Image (spheres, helix red, strand yellow):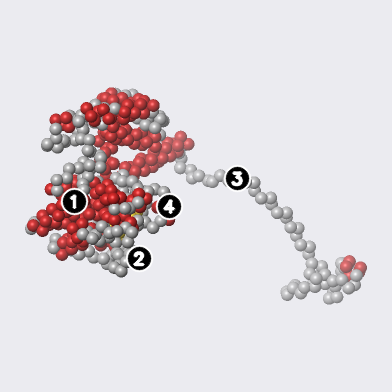
C-alpha cells in the first residue's frame, strides 16, 4: 500500500522541491506520478555559550619520572640558583676593566675582615658591618699609592679622602646586590637606606676643606690650572714630532702618541675611547655647505664606554686643522702610513669583515691587541713632561682642555655638551644631527661663524 501524500491531496499544484530532485542510483518504489517524500533534516543543536574569561585550562599530563614533589622542588631550586649565578657572572665579565680592578681588591678586603671578625652571618652585607669596616679599615688610613720621588713629606703620609671612602662603599654595595639576587640578603640597601652611613659620609665631606689645608694639598689640583695651555700643547706635539723624526728604531710610538693626544683633544674623548677604537669604528661623510673646499671629517662611532654601558651609539668627529702641527687628520695619516709601509705591518685585507674588524687603531703588542693603559699613560706623561706641564689627570686632560678651548673660541655650552656626549636629553640623542659643527670648527682653528 502506497503511503498517502497529504500535500498532493490538499493542493494538487504543490510539490516537494527536495523530493523532486533525481538522485542517480536510487530506485523509488512509489508510483512515478507521486515521488517519495524526503527525509526530515536533523535538528540543529544550539550554539555553545562562549567560555568565561580566564577559564581554567585542563591539566596537562606530566611524565611520571618517579620523583616526589619534595625532590622536584629541590631540583627546581638548584636550577634557579644556577641561573642566578650565571647572570651574576655575566654581569661581572661585562663590566669595564677599570671597574673590575677597583672593586675586586676591596671586596677581597671585606671578606678577609669578616673572616677575622668571625661574624655568625659570614660576609653578609649589612649597614652596621659596612660602617664598622669603613671606620676600622679605611678612614684615617694612609694612601697606598706610591708618591712621586720629588713629593714633599706631607704627601707621603697623606690619609685617604672622601673619594676612597665612596669607592669602598660602592664595592661593598655591589656585593650586597649580588647577595640580594641570590636570595641570601634581605637587609635594605646600606647606602641609600642607611642613616649611619649617610652621617659618616656627611661628616667626611664637611671636614674635607680643613683636612686638605692641614695636609697642604696642592690647591691647583682639579682646578683650571690642572691642565695645559694652547702653547704648551703645541710645544708637546712639536717635541713628539721632533723626537720621532730623530729616532731610528722607535718612530711608531711617537706617531701613535701624537695621534692619540690630537684625537682626544679635538674629539673630546676619554683615553679609553681611543684605546678601544678599531679601524671599523672610523668612517667619513661629507659636511655640506662648508664653502668651496669639500669638508670630509674623520668620524668615530662608539657603543661602549665609561658612561655608556648598554650599547648606545655615540659619535665623535674632527676635521683638518689650520695648523699642520695640530692637525688630527694629518697625524692619523702619518701614523697609519708608517704602520703599513714602514713598520712592517701588512696592509689590511678588506675582503672579509673577519679579516680586518679586529684591527685596533692604536695597536698594542700587535695590531689585534688593544694598547695597555699603562703604555698610554707613560707616553702621554713623557710628552707633557718634556713641555714642562705637570697634571694629575694625564690621559683625561685633553677632553677637558678641548672643551675649554672650544668655549674660548665662541662655541655655545649646548654644542660643547653635544660634542662631548654630556647631553642625555631625548632631543640631543634622537632628533638632532649628531655633529655640532661649531665645536668641530672651533677646535680646528676655523671661524665658527663662517
Pick whichever of labels 1 and 2 is earlier in the sequence: 1
Residue bearing mark 2:
289
Left or right: 87 as drawn, with respect to 214? right
- Disc 3 crowd, CA 10 A, few/some/many (<14, 14-19, 20+): few
Left or right: 265 as drawn, with respect to 431? left
Nearer to us in this view, 214 or 178: 214
**CA gap, disc 3 to disc 4?**
43 Å
Residue bearing mark 4:
427
* Residue 177, placed above or below residue 5: above
Looking at the image, can residue 95 be seen? yes
In this view, the mark in front (4 or 1)? 1
**CA gap, disc 4 to disc 1?**
37 Å
Mark 1 element type: helix
Residue 54's disc is 3
Query: Residue 157: percent from the left, percent from the top?
Result: 17, 29
Looking at the image, can residue 336 be seen? no
Query: Residue 431: percent from the left, percent from the top?
Result: 43, 56
- Disc 1 crowd, CA 10 A, few/some/many (<14, 14-19, 20+): few
Pick whichever of labels 4 and 1 is earlier in the sequence: 1
Amino acid at each position: 500500500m502506497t503511503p498517502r501524500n497529504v500535500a498532493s491531496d490538499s493542493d494538487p499544484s504543490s510539490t516537494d522541491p527536495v523530493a523532486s530532485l533525481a538522485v542517480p542510483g536510487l530506485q523509488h518504489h512509489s508510483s512515478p506520478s507521486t515521488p517519495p517524500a524526503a527525509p526530515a533534516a536533523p535538528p540543529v543543536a544550539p550554539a555553545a555559550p562562549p567560555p568565561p574569561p580566564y577559564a581554567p585550562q585542563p591539566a596537562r599530563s606530566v611524565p611520571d619520572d618517579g620523583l616526589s614533589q619534595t625532590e622536584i622542588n629541590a631540583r627546581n631550586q638548584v636550577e634557579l640558583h644556577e641561573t642566578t649565578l650565571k647572570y651574576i657572572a655575566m654581569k661581572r665579565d661585562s663590566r669595564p676593566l677599570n671597574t673590575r680592578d677597583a672593586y675586586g681588591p676591596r671586596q677581597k678586603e671585606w671578606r678577609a675582615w669578616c673572616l677575622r671578625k668571625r661574624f655568625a652571618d659570614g660576609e653578609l652585607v649589612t649597614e652596621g658591618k659596612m660602617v664598622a669596616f669603613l671606620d676600622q679599615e679605611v678612614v684615617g688610613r694612609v694612601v697606598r699609592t706610591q708618591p712621586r720621588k720629588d713629593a714633599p713629606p706631607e704627601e707621603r703620609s697623606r690619609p685617604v679622602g672622601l673619594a676612597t671612602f665612596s669607592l669602598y662603599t660602592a664595592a661593598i654595595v655591589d656585593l650586597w646586590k649580588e647577595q640580594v639576587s641570590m636570595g641570601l640578603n634581605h637587609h635594605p640597601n646600606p647606602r641609600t637606606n642607611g642613616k649611619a652611613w649617610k652621617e659618616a659620609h656627611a661628616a667626611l665631606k664637611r671636614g674635607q676643606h680643613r683636612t686638605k689645608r692641614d695636609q697642604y694639598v696642592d690647591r691647583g689640583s682639579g682646578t683650571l690650572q690642572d691642565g695645559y695651555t694652547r702653547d704648551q700643547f703645541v710645544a708637546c706635539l712639536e717635541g713628539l714630532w721632533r723626537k720621532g723624526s730623530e729616532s731610528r728604531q722607535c718612530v711608531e710610538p711617537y706617531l701613535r702618541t701624537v695621534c692619540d693626544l690630537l684625537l682626544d683633544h679635538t674629539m673630546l674623548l676619554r683615553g679609553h675611547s681611543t684605546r678601544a677604537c678599531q679601524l671599523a669604528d672610523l668612517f667619513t661623510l661629507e659636511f655640506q655647505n662648508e664653502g668651496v673646499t669639500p669638508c670630509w671629517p674623520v668620524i668615530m662611532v662608539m657603543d661602549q664606554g665609561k658612561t655608556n654601558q648598554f650599547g648606545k651609539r655615540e659619535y665623535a668627529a674632527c676635521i683638518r686643522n689650520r695648523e699642520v702641527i695640530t692637525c688630527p687628520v694629518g697625524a692619523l695619516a702619518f701614523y697609519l702610513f708608517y704602520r703599513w709601509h714602514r713598520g712592517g705591518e701588512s696592509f689590511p685585507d678588506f675582503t672579509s669583515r673577519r679579516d680586518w674588524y679586529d684591527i685596533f687603531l692604536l695597536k698594542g703588542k700587535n695590531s689585534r691587541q688593544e694598547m695597555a693603559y699603562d703604555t698610554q699613560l707613560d707616553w702621554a706623561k713623557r710628552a707633557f713632561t718634556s713641555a714642562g706641564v705637570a697634571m694629575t689627570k694625564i690621559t683625561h686632560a685633553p677632553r677637558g682642555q678641548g672643551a675649554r678651548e672650544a668655549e674660548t673660541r665662541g662655541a655655545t655650552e649646548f654644542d660643547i655638551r653635544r660634542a662631548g656626549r654630556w647631553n642625555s636629553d631625548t632631543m640631543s640623542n634622537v632628533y638632532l644631527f649628531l655633529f655640532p659643527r661649531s665645536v668641530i670648527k672651533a677646535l680646528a682653528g676655523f671661524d665658527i661663524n663662517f
